[in-house]
């Protein structure tokens, strides 16, 4: 079924152009969050050019913005066709609540702590404090001894080992070795690479995907030298451009969803 108009929010121009070439209907494209309104069950999205709003039949959203939680909530209130699932994104947008929920279900959970802003903690072992709602290795601090927090933070043991990501999009899964010159690892360094998928980590990721209700998910884990595994965090809007194979699969999944749903 071809819908008359869709909205694409967050994707860069190259990805938008791919969708444009594989969809015969009308598209409203915004790289940042547009104004929207939901009335009588219809989603209206701000025009890309000019003044006013237009109704759309479907929403594709792929981005992380500082003030996007209410935007995602608005999409969920609309309750129309959204990729990824707006309810799943809403569950995972705030990192600390998402982690708490994941720890309830994950086979690879581990004890966590919490510290309020402007509070001291003393530790004889290495801890990692994590705060805020950004990813890419930001808002993390490793310490021993005395430390004063400046944000509400999760506290977790520092796990020495190999950092990996299980990425799942549209029935396809990958395991990626995360790399970096310091203890902070991510998908962005040139030596990040695809690797054989660990069956246990994949099972855990797919279980969390279903429990939380997500269409796209990327879970970061640590595998220690003795084989012990720990879930670190869930990414609801993972990077899809670092590997061309992933990018192409994501775009095909999106365009198939647009044209077939």
Image (spheres, helix red, strand yellow):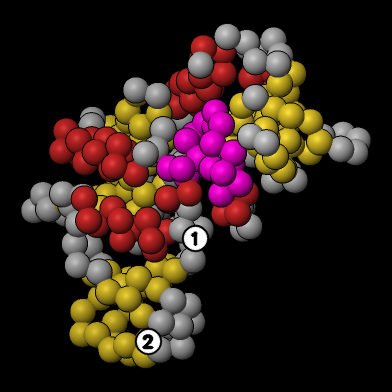
Dot 2: what SS?
strand
Q: Are marks 1 and 2 in contact (CB under 8 Å)?
A: no
Query: Most extreme residue toward the left, as rendered?
Result: 226
For label 1, count other residues whose C-alpha is less than 10 Å away and answer few (under 14), some (14-19) or many (20+): some
Out of 58 and 221, give the one closest to the viewer.
Answer: 58
Query: Is 195 positioned to the left or the right of 4 in the image?
Result: left
Residue matched to label 2: 147
Residue drawn at (45%, 27%) of the image: 246
Tell me how far mark 1 sits from mark 2, CA to CA. Answer: 21 Å
The residue sitting at the front extreme is 40
Residue carrying label 1: 133
| Residue that appears at 20% across and 35% down | 203
User: Does the magenta segment cover residue 122?
Assistant: no
Instruction: Quadrant for the N terminus, please.
Output: top right
Residue 205 seen anywhere in this rendered image of the structure: no
Front one among 59 and 116: 59
Q: Dot 2: within a 10 Å radius of its alpha carbon, few (fewer than 14), some, or many (20 or more) residues?
A: some
Q: Tell me what residue is drawn at x 15 percent, y 49 percent.
A: 107
**Magenta stretch in the rendered image:** 73-89
Q: Is residue 254 left or right of residue 11?
A: left
> In the picture shown, does residue 130 fall above or below 37?
below
The percent coordinates of residue 31 (x first, y second) are 70, 39
Q: Is residue 97 above or below residue 29?
A: below
- Under circle 1, the secondary element is loop
Which residue does the image show at 72% across and 43% down from the upper left? Answer: 36
- Residue 40 location in percent, x, y? 67, 36
- Residue 246 visible in the displayed image: yes
Q: Position of residue 168 (x, y in %)?
A: 36, 32
Q: Which mark is residue 221?
A: none
87 magenta-colored: yes
């Amino acid at each position: 079924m071809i819908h008359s108009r869709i909205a694409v929010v967050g994707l860069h121009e190259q990805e938008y152009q791919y969708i444009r070439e594989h969809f015969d209907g009308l598209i409203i494209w915004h790289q940042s969050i547009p104004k929207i309104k939901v009335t009588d069950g219809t989603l209206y999205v701000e025009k890309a050019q000019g003044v006013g709003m237009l109704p759309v039949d479907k929403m594709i959203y792929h981005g992380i913005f500082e003030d996007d939680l209410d935007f995602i909530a608005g999409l969920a209130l609309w309750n129309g066709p959204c990729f990824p699932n707006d309810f799943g994104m809403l569950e995972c947008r705030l990192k600390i609540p998402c982690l708490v929920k994941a720890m309830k279900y994950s086979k690879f959970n581990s004890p966590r702590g919490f510290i309020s802003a402007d509070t001291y903690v003393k530790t004889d072992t290495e801890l990692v404090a994590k705060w805020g709602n950004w990813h890419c290795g930001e808002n993390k601090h490793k310490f021993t001894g005395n430390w004063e927090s400046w944000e509400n933070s999760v506290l977790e043991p520092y796990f020495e080992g190999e950092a990996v990501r299980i990425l799942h999009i549209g029935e396809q899964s990958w395991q990626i070795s995360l790399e970096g010159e310091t203890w902070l690892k991510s998908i962005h360094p040139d030596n990040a690479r695809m690797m054989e998928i660990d069956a246990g980590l994949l099972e855990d990721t797919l279980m969390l995907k279903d429990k939380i209700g997500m269409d796209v998910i990327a879970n970061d884990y640590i595998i220690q030298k003795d084989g012990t595994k720990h879930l670190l965090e869930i990414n609801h809007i993972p990077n899809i451009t670092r590997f061309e194979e992933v990018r192409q699969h994501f775009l095909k999944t999106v365009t198939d969803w647009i044209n077939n749903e």
